[in-house]
Amino acid sequence: MKKILVAEDNDSNFILMTYILKRFYAYERAKNGQEAVDLVDNGAYDMVLMDIKMPVMDGLEATKTIRERHPDLPIVALTANAFDSDRQLAMLAGCNDFLSKPVSSDLCIKTIQKYIGE
């Protein structure tokens, strides 16, 4: 089963993601950007779903760091910030794609499948 790291500091948002992912994927949680970087460095993940606004290290900085060390790992920004400027910043940081919260189950799964399949 493919494994996804969900970088999300908000408990209710993480619970929503577990409902979307649990039927198709294994997943783990990082509660901040630094934890996401550490987990990716020490684990085998097929993808990262990256919240942008997080404590300790934000998602953009975490994405830049992960991208430098793991250039082929798909990273999808998952954020409540839905402006074009937010999308551009996420893509410049190294994200492969961008989803706005609240994300629909169908769109989330389709986006994941685009990068790592079922």
Image: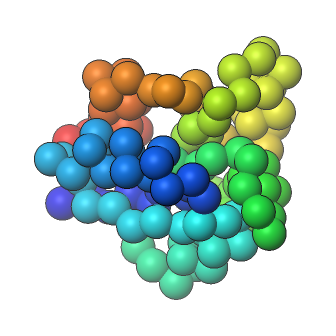
**Colour scheme of this structure image?**
rainbow
| Image quadrant in which the C terminus is located | top left
Picture quarter containing residue 90? top right
Q: In this view, does 74 lie to the left or right of 67?
A: left
Q: Which of 26 and 46 is in front in this view?
A: 26
In the current view of this chain or complex, which residue is farthest to the bottom?
42
Q: Which residue is drawn at 73% across and 33% down?
A: 91
User: Residue 58's x, y, as percent?
Assistant: 78, 56
In the current view of this chain or complex, which residue is farthest to the front?
12
In the current view of this chain or complex, which residue is farthest to the top?
84
Number of labelled discs? 0
Q: In this view, does 93 lie to the left or right of 102?
A: right
User: Residue 28's x, y, as percent?
Assistant: 39, 67
Whether residue 44 is visible, yes or no, is yes
> In the rendered image of this protein, does residue 84 appear above or below residue 41?
above
User: Residue 50's x, y, as percent?
Assistant: 59, 49
| Image quadrant in which the N terminus is located | bottom left
Q: Is residue 116 left or right of residue 95?
A: left
Q: Residue at x 29, y 22 (%)?
A: 106
> In the rendered image of this protein, does residue 118 appear above or below residue 25?
above
> In the rendered image of this protein, does residue 27 appear above or below residue 99?
below
Picture quarter containing residue 56? bottom right
